[in-house]
Image (cartoon, helix red, strand yellow):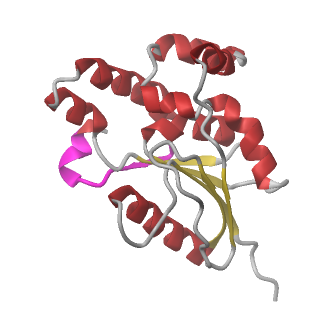
Amino acid sequence: MSTAPRLRVLLLTPIAPAPTGNGLAMRSWLYLRGATAVADVQLVVVPVWGGGGLPTIDLPGLRAVMLPPGAGDARAVARGWLADPEWRERYARIEPVYPPALAVPPSMLADVLAAMDGQRPDVVVAMRLPMVPLAVSVAEHFGAALVVDLDDDDEQFFRESGRPDLADAVARLAVECLADAAVVTIANPLHRSAL
């Protein structure tokens, strides 16, 4: 009797998963632990919020890599977004871009492909909104399902903090990219209406 091949998951996160400490790191850890229970997982960390190294994570079926953020010269970042005609149109609809998303442009697809070493994901999981444009790019490239964990309602947070510019940038990015997701999750059930 043959067994079915294991599901292949690509987990994109802006912080290294950890069982303790930062809330996003712990939430990423829960996703990682759950995914490795049923799938072979490629973890790609792009440290948008905080550097540090990639800790040793000993989970079966896990391959992990850390990629440097793509942010830098604003013109170079814009060229990365504008290199692809489809992303050029999307960029026009989300400009000005939510600043953390500039560190993870969809043009990092080539870096992710190299890190995956020929593996093809069935599912691409993005932790937090800034990771979503890259996740959409990868999911489209492979024809994979897209799962997004927003963690928090950033739009509401920025509106309540008196930062309507950032709230609007978050809203534009969410409208443009979340429609591609098969599943979107959020930590606080009270924020469900924002989805």
Is 187 covered by the magenta stretch? yes
Q: Is residue 89 left or right of residue 148?
A: right
Query: Percent position (x, y) of residue 100?
Result: 45, 32
Q: Quadrant of the N terminus?
A: bottom right
Q: Can you see residue 142? A: no
- The furthest residue to the right: 118
Left or right: 27 with respect to 59?
Answer: left
Residue 98 % position (x, y)? 42, 25
Residue 139 sits in quarter:
top right
For residue 87, above or below residue 92: below
Q: In which quarter of the view is residue 89 placed?
A: top right
Region in magenta: 181-193
Number of numbered discs present? 0
Taking the spot 35% from the left edge, 50% from the top edge, the residue there is 151
Quadrant where the C terminus sits is: top left
Q: Residue at x 77, y 54 (%)?
A: 116
Magenta stretch: residue 90 in it? no
Q: Compared with residue 95, is residue 31 higher up or lower down, i.e. above or below?
A: below
Name the residue located 29 percent from the left edge and 17 percent from the top edge: 165
Q: Is residue 102 visible?
A: yes
The residue positioned farthest toward the front in the image shown: 52
